[in-house]
Amino acid sequence: MIFSCQEKMIKIQYYPDDTLYTEKNAEIIRLDTTKLNFKQITDKIGTFYNRFGKLVVEFDDGKVKKRVIPFVFDGGLIKERNILEITSDSILIDDRYPISELKRILKRHYTNKNNISYYSESPYNALVEVTIDTNKSGKELKQVLTNLTSTFDEIKNELQDSIKLSIYFDYSRQTPRPPRPPKE
């Protein structure tokens, strides 16, 4: 009898790309098994000035393992028009769109090239902000990221371009605004 062992190669896709990933120092949060909620995951992300790239969010979309190196807003200068904000069920641009319109709106965001004043200036400045309920689990974040990354991959293949998907996590829009000062 002859037995043969075949190693299964696991493809890993990185977002925005693998140049930001330093495997030996990174903390990997596996969305299928983590007990952390969205707020806890977001709070662990390092800023550009402190620990950036040391946290990686990992999930399997059924075809490929994906690793996202998420960003948080840390006081840098980012034009609001370059940010496409999405939630679990909506796209927060224009008069809002259902998440089912993600491919059309994401493609417009990346291919706008300064045509529409409130969409991204160029594909290289385009960012996507994920904002979900702070109590949502890693599995619920995985659903949002699976939809986002798969849709982005389709668009990238259609465009045949080297665009990158930069993803920001934010929950500040869920924080109630402070009350206005009393009128004197």
Image: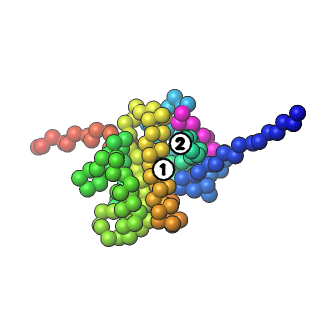
- Cα distance, mark 2 to mark 1? 8 Å
- Quarter of image, res 10: top right
Nearer to us in this view, 65 or 25: 65
Residue that lies at the very extreme toward the right in this rendered image? 1
Q: Is residue 59 left or right of residue 169?
A: right
Residue 164, relative to residue 90: is it above or below?
Answer: below
Residue found 40% across the figure and 50% down from its top: 129
Report the residue marked by disc 1: 150
Dot label at residue 61: 2
Image quadrant where one finds the N terminus: top right
Mark 1 and mark 2 in contact (Cβ < 8 Å)?
A: yes
Q: Amino acid at mark 1?
A: Ser
Nearer to us in this view, 92 or 52: 92
Q: What scheme was used to colour the molecule?
A: rainbow
- The reply to whether residue 51 is visible in this rendering is no
Name which of mark 2 and mark 1 comes first in the sequence: 2
Please report the bounds of the magenta region as a residue range.
Answer: 25-32
Q: Amino acid at mark 2?
A: Asp
Q: Is residue 169 left or right of residue 178?
A: right
- The reply to whether residue 131 is visible in this rendering is yes
Locate residue 105, reporting x and y percent: 35, 57
Q: Residues within 10 Å of mark 1 (few under 14, many from 20)?
A: few
Residue that lies at the very extreme toward the front in this rendered image? 1
The reply to whether the magenta stretch includes residue 29 is yes
Q: Secondary structure at mark 1?
A: helix
Q: Secondary structure at mark 2?
A: loop
Q: Is residue 9 left or right of residue 137?
A: right
Residue found 32% across the figure and 71% down from its top: 115
Locate residue 41, reporting x and y percent: 49, 38
Dot label at residue 46: none
